Image: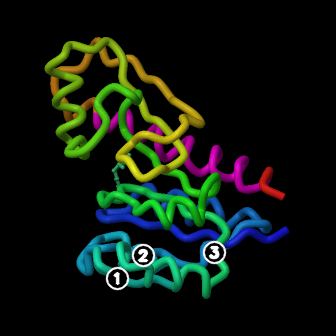
Amino acid sequence: MLKKVAILSSGSGSNAQALITHFASQENIEVVFVGSNRASAGVLEKARHSEVHHGHFTKEDLNNGSLLNALEKLEVDWVLLAGFLLRIPIEFCSRYQGRILNIHPSLLPKYGGKGMYGIRIHEAVFQAGEKESGMTIHYVNEHYDDGAVVFQGRVKIDDVTNAQEIAERVLKLEHAYYPRISTELITLDK
Ligand code: GRF
């Protein structure tokens, strides 16, 4: 049964691109919208290049329900956050409960929550002298990085010399696992 997916991102969109590319080979999954709260986000250019319907929305659109209405008009079944920096309002979470995922570049619950995004995470991991890091795929609720964990990928970092090296190793895990894990969950959703 065809499942329609929306991807929301605030940044460059390398995870969004990995998802779009993988889903193109899945006949039961169609990306019907890629959206960003930043008009200049690289993810929108990637969506245009991949010929996927895309658009910019504001924080108000997210919080006043108009983005939710737009996704419902597109008959979106699943919402995948990929580098999306805004908190999802509770009405949105309720509507997509069990069908909205996020990916976070740390082993939650460590190094998560408000303000923990991008290189800041990896700096904190590096400063703490952690021997491993990784990524977490989790269901989304109305709190940052707080929903039930679906999957975690780990990588050893005891040989790194800076935070950027951690970021690069974790991003590779994200690109490898987010498409596969989300495909499994979406396909299991009858
Ligand atoms: C990724 O590290 C993701 O885990 C986090 O934000 C970053 C987005 O990178 N949520 P990109 O825009 O997918 O390249």
Instruction: Point out which mark residue 142 bears.
Output: none
- Left of 34 or right of it: where is 120? left
Spatial CA span between label 2 and label 1: 6 Å
Residues rendered magenta in the picture = 167-187
- In this rendering, the answer to whether 152 lies above or below 186 is above
* Pointer 1 local density, CA inside 10 Å: few below 14, some 14–19, many at least 20: some
Query: Circle 2 sits in a helix, a strand or a loop, which is it?
Result: strand
Quadrant where the C terminus is found in the figure: bottom right
Q: Which residue in the structure is indicated by mark 1?
A: 56
Q: Which residue in the structure is indicated by mark 3?
A: 76
* Pointer 2 local density, CA inside 10 Å: few below 14, some 14–19, many at least 20: many
In this rendering, which labeled residue sits more in front, label 3 or label 2?
3
- Left of 18 or right of it: where is 146? left
Q: Position of residue 171 (x, y in %)?
A: 38, 42
Scheme of image coloration = rainbow
Spatial CA span between label 3 and label 1: 17 Å
* Pointer 3 local density, CA inside 10 Å: few below 14, some 14–19, many at least 20: many
Front residue of 187/157: it is: 187
Tell me whether circle 2 and circle 1 mark residues in contact (CB < 8 Å): yes
Front residue of 130/76: it is: 76
Tell me whether circle 3 and circle 2 mark residues in contact (CB < 8 Å): no
Q: Residue at horizontal 42%, vertical 23%?
A: 155
